[in-house]
Amino acid sequence: MLLQVENLEVKYGNIQALHGISFHVNEGEIVTLIGANGAGKTTSLYSITRLPPPEAPRVIGGDIKFRGESILKTRPSDVVRKLHLALSPEGRRIFGNLSVMENLKLATYSRAKNADLDHEYERIFELFPRLKERRNQRSESLSGGEQQMLAVGRALMTGCKLLLLDEPSMGLAPVLKYELFRKLKQLNEEGMTILLVEQNANLALHLAHRGYVLDTGNIAAAGTSEELLGNPEVKKAYLGG
Amino acid sequence: MDFIIQNVLNALQWGSFYALIALGYTLVYGVLRLINFAHGDIFMVGAYIAFFVSGFLLGPVIGLSPAMAFAVTVPLTMALTSLVGVTLERIAYRPLRRKGAHRLYVVITALMCGLILEYSNLAVLGASRLKFPELIEKQIWHLGGVTLTNLKVLVIATAIVVFLFLQWVVTRTRVGMAMRAISYDKFAIPLMGIPSDNIIVFTFILGSGFAGLAGLLFAMSYPVLEPFMGMLIGWKAFIAAVVGGIGDIKGAFVGGFLLGFIEVGVVTVFPSTYRDLFAFTILLLILWMKPTGLFGMPQSTKI
Ligand SMILES: Nc1ncnc2c1ncn2[C@@H]1O[C@H](COP(=O)(O)OP(=O)(O)O)[C@@H](O)[C@H]1O
Ligand SMILES: [Mg+2]
């Protein structure tokens, strides 16, 4: 097991956002966490990447293990540089005052000097050709879809082994959504493990191997994508009947 | 004509001092959204560090020649002044940041740190003024009616080199990119595997190091030191940074030189007692017309 979340309880101040949830991700999988707005999906991801205080959601119970070891004491930047876990956060949060290329370069900040970065930039540009065209543009000027691609590309450039994605389809036109999800599938086929958070349950379950349904801080259902797609309650609540 | 050139040179010299100090305000503001009101006193500390370092190097124990002493004093002063700046950040600002303190309290803390630097200097060294040693032999060139000193050239050249250096850092190096990025979205910095504190410390090293350099050059140009020498010049440099557009490196330099020109310009026409009144009034008018400063962006995209 690559990532293992066990009975995780998380609070913001006095408000409890997660009530002891458990899920795991195996190497090579795409796992999705689906659920309505406010269910606790983003909180789950932020708990894993350990935002710096004081914004950090506070873990008050349970554990998060990466390759079997607890990462609750790991510094936020070390989650990326030592554990090779990267998050493309909700709302993309690209550095709008930097160019596309600078955003990608910045993500390599903590990587070994001898890494073959040129090769990796090329790989990102193969995956997202639009980014190559716009590499010298200020990234604020990109469209929403391009910004999302940059956010994913930037996460990949950290040299991650596990990619966490928070609602990558948000705000994208359908065509772009499908294109992005095809790329995610391609990435996974090339060996990337992905934990995908989505409100768009249908799309997410068609991409993922397994999924968990999150409901107000609890796991309401879990199973393979086929199981969840066939589950009447999941269908009713999240797949539009 | 000579009169004008002479005054332009004077304006450039003063502008250089303001710019070298203003950049420290602007860098720290860009990265932390903190107005580091202790920065003027960091400049003062830099001048004193330069005094003691050069005194030690010239003294009987080491006995360097003034030129050699100067060459060693420059890096040593910058390094030690950086250390003071970084220490302030570690013991005063970082703990507040960790606790998520409101910006108001951090600014008050900065003001207090400045006062503590001033009064600890007063307490330790007393109120007597110190005379700064002559490190480089003064050369005066007469070009027509214009007199030019090697020191003046050195000050102006330093400001230009520092400007080019900072531009290079911010646009060409990854740590410089991180400085720009942190000013846009500090939250996303750790997600890139970058420890935010490292970037903040680097920013304080740059700002304080150049304040130390300014302190050294200032002491060489006006060789009398006193504990409150950083106060007024610090305020002026801060205002210059704001007028240029705080957070923007170009703005700090433009604002600094602008202030230098305004001051020297006023004095050529009016009695020198009018200098600060006029200078501040003009700066106020500029801010009135463009509240974000000359190069300032309306929102959070700085440096
Ligand atoms: N910074 C915060 N402070 C307080 N409560 C928060 C904060 N962020 C999220 N919450 C609360 O935690 C719960 C889960 O939110 P979130 O993880 O963002 O849900 P999702 O990503 O599934 O939409 C919600 O009830 C939300 O109001
Ligand atoms: Mg969310």
Image: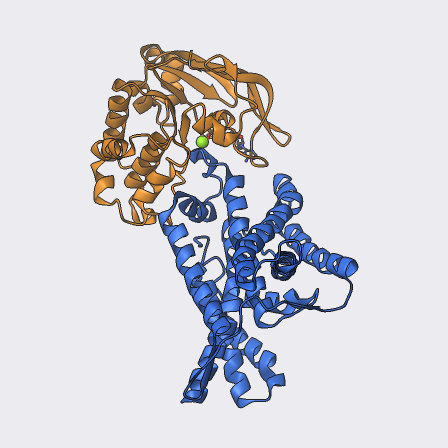
Chain colours: A orange, B blue
**The image quarter in which residue A206 lies:** top left
User: Where does the image place residue A173, in percent across and percent down from the top left?
Assistant: 27, 37
Q: What residue is shown at x 43% (from left), y 67% (from top)?
A: B157
Residue B123 visible in the displayed image: yes
Q: Is residue A109 above or below residue A22?
A: below
Q: Nearer the viewer, residue B226 or B117?
A: B226
Residue B255 visible in the displayed image: no
User: Where does the image place residue B164, in percent across and percent down from the top left?
Assistant: 39, 59
Image quadrant where one finds the C terminus of chain A: top left
Q: Is residue B190 above or below residue A140?
A: above
Q: Is residue A124 above or below residue B237?
A: above
**The image quarter in which residue A224 lies:** top left
Q: Nearer the viewer, residue B15 or B77?
A: B77
User: Where does the image place residue A76, in percent across and percent down from the top left?
Assistant: 51, 30
User: Where does the image place residue A23, in percent across and percent down from the top left?
Assistant: 46, 14
Apparent side of residue B205 relative to residue B130 in the rendered image (left or right)? left
Q: What residue is shown at x 69% (from left), y 54% (from top)?
A: B113
Q: What residue is shown at x 21% (from left), y 44% (from top)?
A: A133
**The image quarter in which residue A72 lies:** top right
Image quadrant where one finds the N terminus of chain A: top left
